[in-house]
Image (cartoon, grey):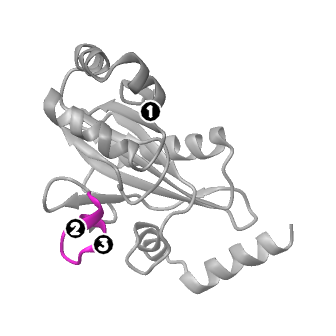
């Protein structure tokens, strides 16, 4: 499974090593463009798209606002896709992938929660071989990390069809407009029935 080249930094290391030397190291090692984000969280809060060193300086401060640890990744240019995984008792199953196309070009907090700012496609506009590979990689990520019940695995698929693992969400949105709900609908599931089954399974443990 491929992940973008990255560097993890703690707030303390950033301070102790000196901001300028760290920024130079990141720029020299990864180049631009970059993505910076808190090591934990959700809804793209604290995430920045970075094209130069000055933006990187501001982006690190932004990321550390949300977490004591940040991740700086090489930006992979391509199509953002997510695959939901569900297990109501018969083992983890992949849901249809959802392609994400933000109108602004970046899937920001505002793009997630403002109507009309993002277009979603399920099935995605990619060939079946890419979709099959993405599904298998999502299932691999889910099981390798040791997740259960429900997860959403996020990817970027580049122009060559290569699948890059970005992150796993253990608390994906469950509203009617969330990508997981879109995938469940595409697969023919009843949302109320799925959520009830998950709650009952959790209660029986």
Q: 204 or 12: nearer the eye?
A: 12
* Segment tinted magenta in the rendering: 108-117
Earlier along the polypeptide chain: callout 3 or callout 2? 3
- Residue at far right of view: 205
Query: What residue is rendered at 25% in x and 47% in y?
Result: 79
Mark 2: secondary structure: strand
Q: Nearer the viewer, residue 70 or 44?
A: 70
Residue 190 location, quadrant: bottom right
SS for callout 3: helix
- Residue at figure coordinates x 30%, y 58% from the top left: 99
Percent across and percent down for residue 114 are 24, 74
Q: What is the crowding at mark 1: few (fewer than 14 residues within 10 Å), some, or many (at least 20)?
A: some
- The answer to whether marks 3 and 2 mark residues whose Cβ atoms lie closer than 8 Å is no
Indicate which disc residue 113 carries: 3
Which of the image's four quarters has the C terminus?
bottom right
Q: Residue at x 59, y 86 (%)?
A: 192
Viewer-side residue, 2 vs 105: 105
Residue 61, compared with residue 124, is above or below; it is above
Residue at 22% x, 67% y: name it. Answer: 119
Report x, y in % for residue 128.
Answer: 35, 49
Residue that badge 2 annotates:
119
Structural distance between the alpha carbons of marks 1 and 2: 35 Å
Marks 1 and 2, the one that precedes in the sequence: 1
Q: Nearer the viewer, mark 1 or mark 2?
A: 1
Q: Is residue 15 visible?
A: yes
Question: Crowding near pointer 3: few (<14 within 10 Å), some, many (20+)?
Answer: few
| Among the 4 quarters of the image, the one containing residue 64 | top left
The residue tagged 1 is 11
**Mark 2 closeness class: few <14, some 14–19, many ≥20 residues within 10 Å:** few
Q: Are marks 1 and 2 in contact (CB under 8 Å)?
A: no
Query: Element at badge 1?
Result: helix
């Amino acid at each position: 499974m491929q992940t973008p080249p990255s560097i993890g930094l703690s707030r303390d290391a950033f301070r102790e090593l000196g901001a300028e030397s760290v920024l130079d190291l990141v720029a020299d090692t990864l180049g631009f463009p970059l993505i910076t984000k808190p090591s934990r969280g959700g809804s793209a809060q604290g995430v920045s798209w970075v094209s130069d060193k000055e933006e990187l300086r501001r982006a690190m401060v932004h990321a550390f606002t949300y977490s004591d640890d940040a991740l700086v990744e090489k930006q992979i240019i391509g199509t953002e896709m997510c695959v939901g995984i569900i297990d109501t008792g018969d083992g983890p199953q992949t849901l249809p992938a959802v392609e994400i196309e933000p109108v602004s070009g970046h899937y920001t907090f505002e793009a997630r929660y403002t109507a009309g700012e993002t277009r979603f496609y399920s099935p995605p506009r990619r060939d079946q071989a890419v979709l099959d590979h993405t599904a298998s990689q999502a299932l691999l990520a889910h099981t390798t990390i040791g997740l259960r019940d429900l997860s959403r695995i996020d990817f970027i698929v580049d122009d060559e069809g290569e699948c890059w693992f970005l992150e796993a969400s253990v608390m994906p949105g469950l509203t009617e407009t969330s990508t997981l709900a879109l995938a469940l609908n595409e697969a023919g599931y009843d949302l109320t029935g799925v959520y009830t089954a998950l709650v009952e399974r959790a209660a029986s443990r």
